Amino acid sequence: AKPPIYYSHPETVRVMQEIWRVRTQGYSVYFTQDAGPNLKLLFLRQDEDIILRHFPAVKIIHPFDQ
């Protein structure tokens, strides 16, 4: 598109950078982004405490629990 559409907000970019920093500490945390500023974090259940420490506002769901 001209002009290009950039959905990320400064806070989105800040969280992306924090995710990359947490990964350098050896944790498997990744993100996906839809057509908007919101990120979805993907991580192992065993790292849930670490994720909450770094991202206290995150809403955690367990999609594979019955």
Image (cartoon, rainbow, N blue to C red):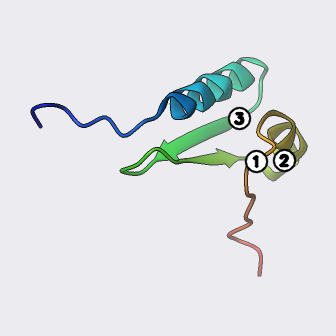
Residue lying furthest left in this view? 2
In the foreground, 63 or 37: 37
Give the quadrant of the N terminus.
Answer: top left
For marks 1 and 3 on the same chain, the one whose residue lies earlier in the sequence: 3
Categorize mark 3 by other alpha carbons within 10 Å: few (<14), some (14-19), many (20+).
Answer: some
For marks 1 and 2 on the same chain, the one whose residue lies earlier in the sequence: 2
Q: Kindly identify the amino acid type of the residue bearing the numbered disc 2.
A: Glu
Q: Nearer the viewer, mark 1 or mark 3?
A: 1
Q: Position of residue 18 (x, y in %)?
A: 67, 25
Q: Position of residue 29 (x, y in %)?
A: 68, 37
Q: Residue at x 80, y 33 (%)?
A: 54
For marks 2 and 3 on the same chain, the one whose residue lies earlier in the sequence: 3
Query: Is 1 placed left or right of 35 in the picture?
Result: left
Rounded to the nearest whole Å, what is the CA distance between mark 1 and mark 3?
A: 19 Å
Q: Which residue is mark 1?
A: 57
Q: Residue at x 42, y 36 (%)?
A: 8
Rounded to the nearest whole Å, what is the CA distance between mark 2 and mark 3?
A: 11 Å
Question: Mark 1–mark 3 contact, CB under 8 Å?
Answer: no
Q: Residue at x 57, y 32 (%)?
A: 11
Q: Is residue 11 above or below residue 65?
A: above
Q: Which residue is mark 2?
A: 48
Q: Which residue is mark 3?
A: 28
Q: Position of residue 36 (x, y in %)?
A: 40, 49
Question: Mark 2–mark 3 contact, CB under 8 Å?
Answer: no
Q: Position of residue 17 (x, y in %)?
A: 60, 22
